[in-house]
Image (cartoon, coloured by chain):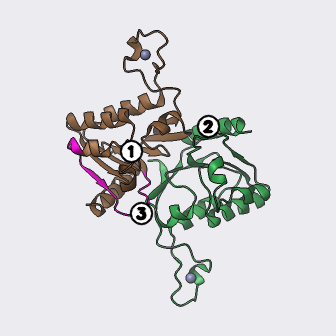
Chain colours: A green, B brown
């Protein structure tokens, strides 16, 4: 049996920043392990490298997690879509300004992937764009797979696109 | 090691309907096993069931393959997005008219999945919508995984959505 986890969206709410210790009465945020919380934990578990190849990144919780990984010394690289980068709310510029290596396609066609490779071992892949609508509104999935023999094929494709968009 | 195949798009051309035996001079279609050809072969390999949960289906080659599966007795079911169904070129109406069970979401949020479960065993999952732009223009991926323990989770999600969209 292959090591894996499947996350389905939408979540019922964004995670509460107070977590389990939240004392606010009628707090509208989530205190359980939502799909976003699990995804943030996966990003937080990266030790060496995180290659993110995602069409649209606008969810601040996720870009904060990428920035935190970058700041703790993980080699974070991001490929995204140029049209999406120009969209209001895109976090790509903010990550780039913070020193995270970012490249985008330069064509009208979409760089439509939504995958990430973590420590050359775990593949995160599915329909999920890293957006608020992806978290809270749409039906979405992310499959996390512990299969280096699969991850390597995505890493190779990442490298091809990384070179092409240089 | 987990049984798998990874397909990356775009293809350089749509497959030639004459295949390897094509004699047309300067035929602009593809005669090799493109990613679309492999995907069509996967669909063609279905023996019992094919649960397709894909945001947008407009590629005639793919809907023809679904129709062929339906006609040879495979239990084909399709979930798609209602907004996409209304889009010009959608094949959902055609499949429905041909007797393929189809259900769509009834909300403004997107039914954004792009997965299929084949014979309760193989999972096809990734960024790829079943569209001509997905085949010929965009950077896309489909991971085909031979892992019933993963496929079952997507089958369960399919059933949940199937009931919800009844
Ligand atoms: Zn709270
Ligand atoms: Zn030809």
Question: Which of the labelled discs sits on residue A49, or is there none?
Answer: none
Label 2, label 1: how far apart the Cα atoms are: 32 Å
Q: Residue at x 47, y 47 (%)?
A: A2
Q: Tell me the chain of label 1.
A: B
Q: Circle 3 is placed at which residue position? A: B108
Name the spot of residue A54 as percent of width and height, x first.
60, 50
Q: Is mark 1 within 8 Å of ligand 2?
A: no
Q: Is mark 3 within 8 Å of ligand 1?
A: no
Name the spot of residue B109 as percent of width and height, x first.
43, 62
Task: Based on the picture, tell me whether residue B24 belongs to the magenta stretch.
Answer: no
Label 3 environment density (alpha carbons within 10 Å; few <14, some 14–19, many ≥20): few
Mark 3 element type: loop
The magenta segment is B97-113
Q: Tell me the chain of label 3.
A: B
Question: Which of the labelled discs sits on residue B88, or is there none?
Answer: 1
Q: Circle 2 is placed at which residue position? A: A157
Q: Is residue A23 found left or right of B50 in the rendered image?
A: right
- The foreground one among B119 and A161 is A161
Name the spot of residue B158 as percent of width and height, x first.
34, 55
Contact (CB < 8 A) between labels 3 and 2?
no
């Amino acid at each position: 049996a292959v090591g894996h986890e499947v996350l389905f969206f939408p979540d019922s709410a964004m995670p509460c920043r107070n977590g389990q210790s939240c004392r606010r009465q009628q707090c509208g945020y989530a205190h359980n392990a939502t799909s976003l919380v699990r995804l943030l934990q996966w990003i937080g578990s990266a030790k060496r490298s995180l290659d993110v190849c995602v069409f649209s990144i606008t969810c601040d919780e996720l870009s904060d997690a990428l920035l935190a990984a970058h700041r703790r010394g993980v080699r974070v690289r991001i490929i995204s879509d140029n049209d999406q980068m120009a969209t209001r709310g895109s976090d790509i510029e903010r990550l780039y300004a913070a020193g995270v290596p970012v490249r985008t396609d330069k064509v009208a066609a979409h760089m439509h992937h939504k995958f990430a490779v973590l420590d050359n071992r775990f593949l995160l892949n599915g329909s999920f764009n890293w957006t608020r609508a992806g978290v809270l509104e749409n039906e979405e999935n992310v499959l996390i797979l512990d299969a280096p023999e699969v991850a390597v094929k995505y890493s190779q494709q990442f490298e091809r696109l990384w070179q092409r968009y240089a």
